[in-house]
Every structure is written in C-alpha cells, then in structure tokens.
Image (tube, coloured by chain):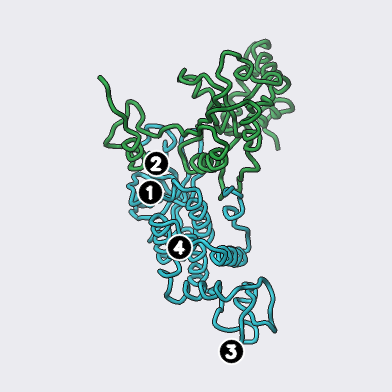
Chain colours: A green, B cyan
Amino acid sequence: MPAFSGPLQALVDELGRLPGVGPKSAQRIAFYLLKVPGPDALRLADAITAVKERMTLCTRCFNVAEGELCAICLDDRRDSTVVCVVEDPRDIVAVEKTGEFAGRYHVLQGALNPIEGVGPDQLRVRELLARVDAEGLTEIILCTNPNLEGEATAMYLARLLNPLGLTVTRIASGLPVGGDLEYADELTLGRALEGRRTVEA
Amino acid sequence: MSLFRDRGIVLRGIRLGETDRIVTILTEEHGKVRAVARGVRRPGSRFGARLEPLTHVTFLGWQGRGDLDTLNQAEVVDTFRAVREDLDRMAAALTMLEVADQIAQERHAIPALYRMLAGALGALNERPSPMVAPAFHLKVLALDGSAPVLDGCVSCGREDVELVAFDLTEGGALCRGCRRGRPITPAALDIMRRTLQGGLAGVLSEPPSAVADEVATLATEAMEVHLDRRLRSARSGMLP
C-alpha cells in the first residue's frame, strides 16, 4: 500500500527512479519540493520540460544540441578538419575545459564492449567514416577512455581509418598531475615512460 | 567475515555509483570472486589500472556477510600489454575471459581453470597465434568433462573409418554414414587431436590459415553448445 496519497507518492516514485537516488532520498527531495514556494518548484518542472522538448542530438557529431546542429558545430572559428572522437557528450565538456582543442567532435554514444554484446553497429561508427570525405578531415584524435573498452574502440577505429590516408592519433596515457610515482600502476607508468619527451629549459 | 589473499585474473568490471566498480576475478583458491573496488574510477585511485579486465593480480580482499567482497589492495602480476595493444589478440583474449566467466562458479575453486587462463593469456602475450583461443576452448571443454571424441565415430564407434563431420551435441566427430552437424577437414581434426593429446606447443605455432579459422569456428561453436548460450565476444564484430 502506498505510503503517501496521490501526487506526492507519484513524485516519490518518479524521483526514486533517478540514478543514485534511493527511496529515502526520493522521499526527502519530494518533501523539500512540497515545502518550497511554488515558482521555485515550477522552475525545476519547466527545466525538465524544456530539456525534453528542445534538446536533441546534433545531426553531424551526435553531441546534445538545441536544434539541428550543436553549438560547437555551428562555431565557424573552430578547425573543421580536425575531429576529436569521444564516447559520451560529457567527455566533450572535459576536453573543452582544457582549452587545448579547437577542432570539432564526434560522439560515438558508447564504446565497444564485446563481452556485454556492444559491437560497432551500436555505435556511431558509420557516421564518423562518412564525415571523413564529406568534411575533408585531415586528423582524427581518438579520445576514448583509457580502459579496456576505450582501447578496443580506439584500435578498431584506427584499423578502419588508417587506410583512408588521414592522420589518426590517440591521446596520451600518463600520470595525473599532482600524483605520486610510488602509487602509480605498472601499465600507466610504463606508458608514461614510453611517451616521455625531451625537456628544454 | 575475514581477510583473504589470493591471485587471479580480472574478468570484467561493472560501474557502481560515481567512482566505484564491481570487479569479477577468477582466482586460484576462491573460485570466481565478485568484489567492490572503492574509488577505482577516480584518476588518483590507489588501484589505478590494476583492476582493469585482462590483468593478472594478487590482491587482498575482505569477505563480509553479503555476496560482494571488498578489495583492499592489488598488485600486478602481468598486464598482458602486447595483448592490450593488438586488436586481434584482444578479441581472442576477450572470448577467453567470457568463457572463464561462464564456466567458473562463485567461491568454488577450479585451480586448473585459473592456470589455463593465465597460461593462455601469457602465450597470447608472447606471440599472436590464432590457435590460442580455440585451444583454450577445447581444453576447457575437456576440463569440464565434455572433450569431443576425435579418434573414432562418436555415433557408431568405428575407428577404421574416415571422419568427415563434427557435431558437439553428438559429442564429437562422425563418419560418412552417421554424419551430422558441420563438415570437418582431416587437417582440422588433426589440430584438435594434437591440442587435446599433448601436442599443444606445436599447435600454437600454427600460422594463420584456413584450417586455423576452421578449428576456431568449430571450437567456438562447440563451446557455445556446451554453455548453451552464444559467446557475445566472438560475435560482436569487433574485428573489421
């Protein structure tokens, strides 16, 4: 039997379906929303409605977009010949924060995970290949996660892209700034050593 | 509730919450262990890449009351780096991890399975042999008591006839009169026999060939019949 009546129980149930929100948290948020002034709660409702109505996927790069193309694809100042391939739109935010990249992106919407049955057909691979000629790409940076799935995806894409005659690069692996060598794992430290560079002071 | 120490190979990991992961490890003494690695997805995690699938580790775990253990420390035995950096070898390794995950049972030690997986991954790391994964599948079938009959017709029992077909639901190779399942060439039959009858070293030095592909297909299908499910990693299309 539901603990609360009508709309309040519906709200608790819906909040409880959100990732990382348990039944107690759902109850607490629901009661908070019940208590705050009407306009404050409605702003949340409006934001949810607006996101669901107006946000889609960019038809070119599959980033989230308000309209046909995302803000990055619409920006003419960006280098249209270099594309950074990421797994998820949230990865774009991470790369943008570095301020080191001025090209465009391509979001695969996931990574190869053969054991879980995720193959290339479930990713936006065909669309990436179509962009190579259509947009005259000269370099593709494989910026998938440095884990088993991300590495498999990067190697798969490299095998498809290399014969097309453009530069295919992979982001470097190494030690986190502020980290400690003593606690570095062998794989990361090994790659950091392999990718060492000359220092000019 | 106790601390335990073991070594094993990380088979898979699933994300848990913001920064944790549940890892499945095929251990030597505790069978398949599922354990939570807290904070493993943070860039500065003390685990680093040590708990990525396809890593051979020694670890210290805590077995509580529930199904999930907790990982306290992990040290690398081998990262199989050459396997990680070659798409073909990684594809072969992933099918072996999937098979080991399906065969092993939680907290039920099968030390031979652990040793076979560690040995097979080590062999794959040393050279890009197309026969490692098929040989592993056949050896696991034998370990599980389902080794295919290859020295005579599994249906009529005659040994003085040519064997022309292979069907694992029947239990092995079949003669012309009893044939069912897939056709099999004498060369493929020979490789399978050598794999199961002490000639593994020679089999692993077989170069890529049509026969190697045939054995790979037969071994994969035989494993699928044995497990009664498809091997997702063998059919994911990750090799363009």
Specify few, some or many for label 3: CA neighbours under 10 Å numbering under 14, 14-19, or 20 or more.
few
Distance, label 3 to label 4, CA atoms, is 42 Å
Q: Which label is found at residue B79?
A: 1
- Dot in front, 3 or 2: 3
* Number of disc labels: 4
Mark 4 or mark 2, earlier in chain: 2
Q: Which chain carries label 2?
A: B
Q: Give the left or right position of residue A106, taking residue B122 as reference.
A: right
Callouts 3 and 4 close, C-beta under 8 Å: no
Residue A58, placed above or below residue B167: above
- Dot in front, 3 or 4: 3
Find numbered disc 3 in the image and state the secondary structure of the residue it sits on: loop
Distance, label 3 to label 1, CA atoms, is 47 Å
Tell me the residue at 44%/56% (across/down).
B128
Callouts 1 and 2 close, C-beta under 8 Å: yes
Residue under label 4, please give it: B108
Distance, label 3 to label 2, CA atoms, is 54 Å
Find numbered disc 1 in the image and state the secondary structure of the residue it sits on: loop
Q: Give the left or right position of residue A104, taking residue A195 as reference.
A: right
Tell me the residue at 71%/21% (across/down).
A68
| Residue type indicated by callout 3 | Asp
Residue under label 2, please give it: B49
| Residue type indicated by callout 2 | Ala
Mark 3 or mark 2, earlier in chain: 2
Residue A149, placed above or below residue A84: below
Q: Give the left or right position of residue A132, taking residue B46 as reference.
A: right
